[in-house]
Structures are given as C-alpha cells and as structure tokens.
Image (cartoon, grey):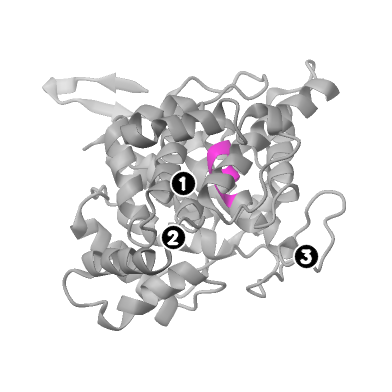
Amino acid sequence: MRSTRPNDARTVSLTPSQLDRVEGVLLAQAVGDVMGVPYEPGDVPLEGLPRLLGGGFGDYAPGEWSDDTQMSLYIAQVAATGADLSEDTALDKIARGWCRWVTVDGATDVGAQTREVIGAVAADAEAPGIAARMRAAAKALHARTGQTAGNGALMRNGIVGLTRLGNRRATAAAARAVAELTHADPLAGDSCVIQAEMIRANIMAPPWQGMPYFGANALAALDLIPTERRRYWHDLFDGGILDAAHCQEPPSGDGFTVHALGHATLAFTFANRVGNRSGAPMGRDRQEVARIWMEALLDRAVRASQDKDTIGAITGAIAGSYLGASALDPRWVAAVHGLPRRSDDAERTATDLRALARATASAGLSR
C-alpha cells in the first residue's frame, strides 16, 4: 500500500496487486458459487472439472450465481459507500435489501434459517429499526431451537473483509454485526470474523510469489474471538477436525458454519499437497501457475463438500484475496451473472463485482 502527504493531507492507495486481490474476493466467490450450483442436489455426477451447467436448487441458468453471492451484493451496495457496517444505520439498509430480495427481487434457494428470520420482519421492512427487529427475530429463533449456526452468514461474508483494510478490529466488528442480523449463534459470528480477517490480511500482505499457499492463517485471527471461545477454535485448527492433517477427509455436515469454514481452509492444504506432488512447475509463467492453484482450490472445495455452491463461494472469497482476480479462468469470469439487478434492470456481471469490491476497499481506506 502506498501513502503520500501532499499539502499535509494523507492519501492512501492500493497497489495494482492489491487491487487485483480486492477484485478477486467477489469474483472468485461468484466463480466458486457457480461451480458448485449444478452438483449440489447430487443428481448430476461431478466427473472431471466442474462445468457451467446451471440447474441446481434454484434452477439457475449456466453461469448464474446462487443466493450466496446474491446476499453478498446487498451488503456490497452498502459497503461501497464506506458505511460502518457495525452501525445500525448501515445494517438497516442491508436488512431492507435482504427483505426486498425475498419479497420483490426474486430471491432463489433461500436457506431455511435465513428465510424464517427475514420472513418474520419483511412486512415491516420500511419502518425504522429493521436491523434491530431482524436481530431480535434471529435471537428468538435461537431461543426456540438452539440451532442457528448454519453456514448462511459465512457464505455472504467475503465482502466484509474489504470494508476496513487498515483496521482488523473494525473489520471483525462489521463481520459479527452483519452475521448477527440472521444468525444469533456466536459460532456463526466467529466464523465470519475469522474469514474476514483472513481476507483482509491476505490483501494487505505482499503478493503471491508463485509458491504454494502461505496466506493468512485462521489461528492468527483468534485474538479477535471472545476469550471464552478461543480455546474451542484453537483446538479445532490445531489437532482437531479442522487441522491440516485432515485435508483428505474434511468434516461432514458442512451446513454447520464451523465445518463450512473448515472445508474452505482445508481445501488450501489439499491443493498445496497436490501441487507439490505435481510440481506446480517452476518454468511456467507465474500467471499460469496462479490459475492452476486457483482451479485446484475451487475444484477441491466443490468436490469435497455437500453444500457445494456455498463451500465454493466461501473458499473462493479467501482464494481471490490471495491469488487475485487475474488467477481466474477468463471464461468463467465472463460467464458469471445474477441478482440483484442493476437500476437499469440488467443482471449484474463480473464488471459490477469488480466495481463494488474496489469501491468498498477504497471507501474503507479513507475512513
């Protein structure tokens, strides 16, 4: 990151590599999402590399992203203004966007927990205090069921990692606040904090140097987790079911936010080991090698999971923050599209994802 002080006014800008990684968060999330869409119901066998088939639970068109990326873009539209996502003024806008998504904009394949919470408040969405009422609905659901640690908060969280690139605690606060709109279980918020910090740290680190993945480590984010749960997370990643030793056999039940995050982090270990065996060839162009790594990461994430579009999206956001948008196959980037529609009623495309990601990162640096 470069900074200058012309006329005593501080100007901060991101390097070209950092901007590529910023764009990579939403773009790789969308690509991972689209990769998983056709195979999640299990009716279509995943043979060879994933293909642009469409279908899935939302009856998507080829290249159309699912609810994972749809929800992210309602967050992104608010984040791109530089708003503080830990404050209710911004959270009200996000909550209203999600209500509009379900009632007007044509939401597809909405998760059961998310649909129940949004459905409890959508009729009154325009009244003041919608974020507080949505949080209350999420807490009420948790009080009734004790089961609100689904992966629905984590799937949409990647953009939050771009909101305050220079401030890890502000990033963590935003991740938890957005998660709590629909997911009251603190483990859901913890998962979002860890992923957002991994994304933030990857972008603020030096660029990838053509070697296996040595990006942000989930354990380095644990000081951002409340003290009473740090040991729980530490033991999962260090010797537990999310330890790198389990990359060949990630935990089952990835609808659970903890296991969903584990699938994403273990995909990196798996890709490293496969890449090391195959040589991730020294004489090749670095960009070509980056695409090999990206393909291996997303393919593994989708192949090893049950909730394939969601794990693809969660993994993609982290992978994009490390390898950048330029590591994605241009054919996939050109193909992705989906809701929410723009003001001209056109579906959004990769161009919109790039713009929203850049605007979010740039606005956050000036705060």
Visible residue check, residue 340: no
Residue 213, image quadrant: top right
Query: Residue 140, percent across and down?
Result: 32, 68
Q: Answer with mark 3 or mark 2, whichever residue precedes in sequence.
A: 3
Instruction: Give the residue at x 65% y 35%.
Output: 266
Query: Residue 270, percent across and down?
Result: 72, 32
Q: Answer with mark 3 or mark 1, whichever residue precedes in sequence.
A: 3
**Category of crowding for the residue at label 3, using alpha-carbon neighbours closer than 10 angstroms: few (below 14), some (14–19), many (at least 20):** few
Queried whether the magenta region covers residue 186, the answer comes back as no
Q: Residue under label 1, please give it.
A: 158
Q: Answer with mark 1 or mark 2, whichever residue precedes in sequence.
A: 2
Instruction: Give the residue at x 58% y 51%.
Output: 313
**Category of crowding for the residue at label 1, using alpha-carbon neighbours closer than 10 angstroms: few (below 14), some (14–19), many (at least 20):** many
- Tell me the number on the disc at residue 42: 3
Q: Are marks 1 and 2 in contact (CB under 8 Å)?
A: no
Which element carries disc 1, helix, strand or loop? Answer: helix
**Image quadrant in which the C terminus is located:** top left
Amino acid type, residue under disc 3 in the picture: Gly
Which element carries disc 3, helix, strand or loop? Answer: loop
Comparing labels 3 and 2, the label whose residue is closer to the camera: 2
Q: Residue under label 2, please give it.
A: 148
**How would you classify the magenta stretch by its main secondary structure?**
helix
Comparing labels 1 and 2, the label whose residue is closer to the camera: 2
Q: CA distance from mark 1 to mark 2?
A: 20 Å
Provide the residue span drawn in magenta: 313-319
Amino acid type, residue under disc 2 in the picture: Thr
Q: 150 or 212: which is nearer to us?
A: 150
Q: CA distance from mark 3 to mark 2?
A: 25 Å
Queried whether the magenta region covers residue 314, the answer comes back as yes
